[in-house]
Image (cartoon, rainbow, N blue to C red):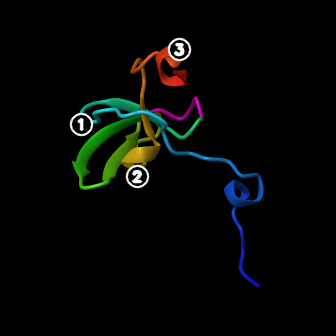
Amino acid sequence: MSLSSYSDVFSISHEREYEEDIQAGDLVRTGPNLFPHFEVVAVHGDKAWVRNVVNGADHLALLSRCRKINGQPLAEAAE
């Protein structure tokens, strides 16, 4: 028996549907979540090293799941 994530069970997609240039220093959030906010420390390939702006915890995130805060307007993304 293989374990499934909640994303698999509920068919939730965390990937962005549009292109976005994410670089070190950008503020981002991950997936469709509004919080927490992260600062991008570094980018390499398809991954970003991000730091939680509230508690300073570091994480690795897929770039395709990062969304800039104050990035592309939602109306443009829906097109």
Mark 3 nearby-residue class (10 Å; few <14, some 14–19, many ≥20): few
Residue 23: mark in rendering: 1
Residue 67: mark in rendering: none
User: Would you name the residue on which mark 3 appears?
Assistant: 75
Image quadrant where one finds the N terminus: bottom right
Mark 1 nearby-residue class (10 Å; few <14, some 14–19, many ≥20): some
Range of magenta residues: 33-37
Residue 7 sits above or below residue 75 on the image: below
What's under tag 3, amino acid-wise?
A: Ala
The answer to whether 65 appears left or right of 47 in the picture is right
> Which circle, 1 or 3, is nearer the viewer?
3
> Residue 68 at what x, y percent from top left?
39, 28
Q: Nearer the viewer, residue 70 or 16?
A: 16
Residue 6 sits above or below residue 40 on the image: below
What's under tag 1, amino acid-wise?
A: Gln
- Name the residue rendered at 23%, 37% in the picture: 24
The mark nearer the N terminus, 1 or 2, is 1
- Name the residue rendered at 55%, 22% in the picture: 78
- The main secondary structure of the magenta stretch is loop
- Name the residue rendered at 32%, 50% in the picture: 49
**Residue projecting furthest to the front:** 79
**SS for dot 2:** strand
Residue 62: mark in rendering: 2
Distance Cα–Cα, label 1 vs label 3: 23 Å
The question of residue 21 being in magenta is answered with no
